Image: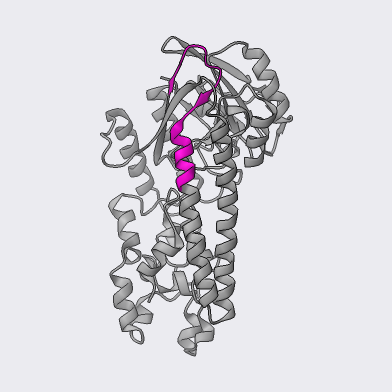
Amino acid sequence: MVIVDGGDLFWKSGSLVGDRRQRDIKADLQAGAYNLTGLDAFVPGEGDLSLGLERFQELTHGWPVLAGNLTCGEQSWPTTTRVESGGRVIGIIGVVDYEVEGCTTSPPLDAIRAGVTELGEVDALVLIAHVQANVTREAATEVPELDFILNGHTRQRHGQPFSLDNHAHQLGSGSRGKVLGMLELQFNEGATFFASDATAKHLEEEVERHTERREAAMGKLDAATDDEERARQQRQVEYYDQKIAEYSADLEAARAASGGPSHGFENQLRELDDGVADHVGTKALLDAALTQIDELPPLAVKPKARETPYVGTASCRGCHQEQFAQWNATGHARAWDTLAKAKRANDEECFSCHVTGAVDPRGPQTVDAVHPELRGVGCESCHGPGEEHLKGPSVDTMTLPTQETCVSCHDGERDDGQFDFETYHPKVAH
């Protein structure tokens, strides 16, 4: 078994915002969990280094950190490591491509090529890269020795790895630690590359699924009776056109990779939900961290709760009783309760999508600022703040939700890519 991580473990971006006390508690939790299980390779993201170099080194002490093209002051890291597992040698290369204060990077492709030479002969070659998506594809094209690529920056989730140029495959297990990616390799005598029939089948299904959705969107576009609806459906069509082109290109690469003798692989994404038994040591660390967060004293400067144009769903009920009843039967109405049940109500990484207005700079920006009337995903989460509407009820003082409204939270990361506007919008529309 080989255990690796592609970065942004301790924080999600190069900008450290919010309550630093929560960030440090969580970082200790995440580092402690990996210290229990062990790591074979860790490639840091800019979010990890946002805690500061000294703090990052403290958290990752003894870890096999790879970042061959990154230098922070006098600190540098190796490019490669060789890991033996099941009688095979897995070569791992680690590179990054981002800007962090006090650090510099050299071109990642140069570091990857140097890493291939440094590793020499291995049974499988894995690139762990914290880079933009285009660099991933360029690496597959320019460095034909690569077998698998894990990009820790894009946070993409792939049930089946994407086939890239030169028989390389792109892995992805999403973000926020919700899913564990498990790749099993099967080695065959005389083979020189890896291939999987499941990859091509998955891509065929994606092309078919998005083609059907495009046809549905085209039907709605033809039937649209106003400019706003036509523009929305046109955006849907363009989105599906883009996805169909991407999946078709990956399908062509996957089919090209199926010729000749090949090694096999099977990829699984395991949901880390209640169906997975708790690890005793990790559970103890998690419980301690949640208790610490819950018991944090208020910030020295506590924001006022109601300096916001958001008035709360209760204010809408008097005039919109039917709509209120429909909303009250949806999961949106209980969004805050799910946090409280999971002991995440004080978690600054979670609350913004479970209260009304927090994704808007005019709404509550910290846990302390969440007024009870704003708990849950209320009317104003979709229709905008209601202060002006209360003063003078008019359709002009509220907004109609669009797909862009939804994806401010259902962004493919927080929901693990499950959200589809055409499927879910009818469940909440009224």
Residue 196 belongs to magenta span: yes
Residue 160 belongs to magenta span: no
Answer above or below: position of 282 versus 373: above
Answer above or below: position of 244 versus 257: below
Answer above or below: position of 424 versus 46: below
Q: Residue furthest front?
A: 259
| Residue in the image at 26% along x and 39% along y | 275
Q: Is residue 358 visible?
A: no
Residue 131: where, in percent of width, then height?
A: 63, 37
Answer above or below: position of 244 versus 335: above
User: Where does the magenta region start and end?
Assistant: 185-205
| Residue in the image at 45% along x and 23% along y | 264
Q: Determine whether, in the image, residue 99 is placed left or right of residue 409.
A: right
Foreground of the two, 241 or 418: 241
Residue 286 found in image quarter: top left
Residue 180: where, in percent of width, then height?
A: 40, 34
Is the N terminus in the top left, top right, bottom left or bottom right quadrant?
top left
Residue 23: where, in percent of width, then height?
A: 48, 42
| Residue in the image at 53% along x and 14% along y | 123
Foreground of the two, 332 or 125: 125
Foreground of the two, 210 or 381: 210
